[in-house]
């Protein structure tokens, strides 16, 4: 393993956000990419949470995407030449708790999406379990609140900068739109969010770390992103 490395699965929305930030910081790192989830024993060697991403930077080992990104912002000053530039911090001192609340709310959105996706891939639909349905029912309320937190359709959550909040929200919406999980972001009802996501999607860091379509049976991707399915034995 090199001095800096990231363990992730291809489809993880949270790990994708970390990869985007690494690109925005112009940092090279070893990509330890897994198409499918390994055994509990193998994953536990990297993190006791059994989740991705896990990040190594020399002797530092971190898990949980927001924590990894907060570490990266605190340690590295380099940035791409794109504008707006990546914010220097997750939360501004003058609006610390508001900015942290926005990030927590965005991450609650991502967690709800991930739960629905995991249940769907296990054969449990929204109609099968109240817990899954409640996670889906959160979405319009979360999007509605986040829409009110944007000051205009020309700015992100930290005006003048590309924020971590902007990146995570875009990754979460991209996941909804590229997974067969019966969720709809309804961005027509959130024009400021829609404008934000269109701007973020245009950045090179997003294009370098695309979101792929996935469903059970996918074991890889062609160079153009076309899913490769496992052959079924009849």
Image (spheres, grey):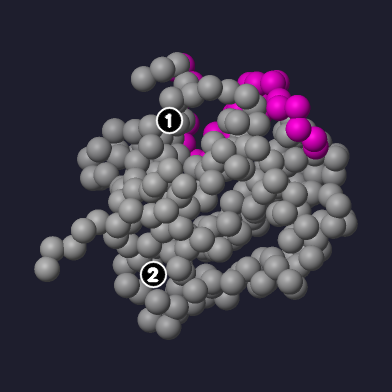
Question: Which residue is disc 2 drawn over?
Answer: 120
Most extreme residue toward the left is: 234
Q: Position of residue 101 (x, y in %)?
A: 70, 52
Give the x, y percent position of residue 171: 59, 51
Does residue 127 sit above or below 116 in this rendering? below
Q: Which mark is residue 31?
A: 1
Number of the label disc, if any, that sits on residue 94 = none
- With 158 as the anchor, is 4 left or right in this view? left
User: For the residue carrying disc 1, how many other residues have a C-alpha within 10 Å: few (<14), some (14-19), or many (20+)?
Assistant: some
- Left or right: where 71 falls relative to 46: right
Q: Residue at x 74, y 61 (%)?
A: 194
Q: Foreground: 198 or 105?
A: 198
Which percent across, then down, holds residue 27? Answer: 58, 23
Task: Give the residue at x 60% y 31%.
Answer: 23
In the rendered image, residue 76 lying in the magenta stretch gets the answer yes
**Which-is-in-front pick, marks 1 and 2?**
1
Q: Secondary structure at mark 2?
A: helix
Q: Which quadrant would residue 33 be assigned to in this image?
A: top left
Q: Which residues are magenta?
A: 57-84
Q: Is residue 52 magenta?
A: no
Q: Secondary structure at mark 1?
A: strand
The answer to whether residue 51 of the structure is visible from this angle is: no
> Tag 2 or tag 1, which sits nearer the N-term?
1
Whole-percent x, y for residue 72 in the image: 60, 28
Q: Could you say which quadrant of the image residue 8 lies in? A: top left
């Amino acid at each position: 393993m090199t001095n800096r490395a990231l363990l992730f699965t291809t489809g993880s929305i949270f790990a994708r956000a970390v990869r985007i930030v690494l690109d925005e910081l112009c940092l090279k790192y070893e990509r330890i990419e897994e198409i499918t989830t390994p055994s509990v024993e193998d994953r536990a060697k990297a993190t006791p949470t059994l989740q991705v991403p896990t990040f190594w930077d020399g002797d530092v080992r971190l898990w949980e995407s927001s924590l990894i990104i907060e570490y990266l912002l605190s340690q590295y000053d380099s940035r791409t030449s794109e504008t707006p530039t990546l914010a220097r911090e997750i939360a501004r001192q003058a609006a610390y708790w508001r900015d942290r609340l926005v990030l927590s709310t965005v991450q609650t959105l991502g967690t709800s999406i991930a739960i629905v996706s995991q249940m769907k891939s296990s054969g449990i639909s929204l109609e099968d379990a109240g817990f899954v349905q409640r996670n889906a029912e959160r979405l319009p309320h979360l999007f509605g609140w986040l829409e009110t937190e944007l000051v205009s359709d020309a700015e992100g959550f930290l005006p003048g900068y590309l924020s971590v909040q902007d990146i995570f929200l875009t990754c979460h919406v991209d996941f909804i739109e590229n997974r067969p999980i019966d969720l709809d972001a309804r961005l027509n009802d959130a024009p400021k969010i829609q404008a934000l996501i269109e701007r973020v999607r245009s950045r090179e860091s997003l294009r370098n770390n695309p979101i792929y379509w996935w469903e059970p049976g996918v074991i890889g991707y062609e160079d153009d992103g076309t899913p490769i399915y496992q052959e079924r034995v009849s």
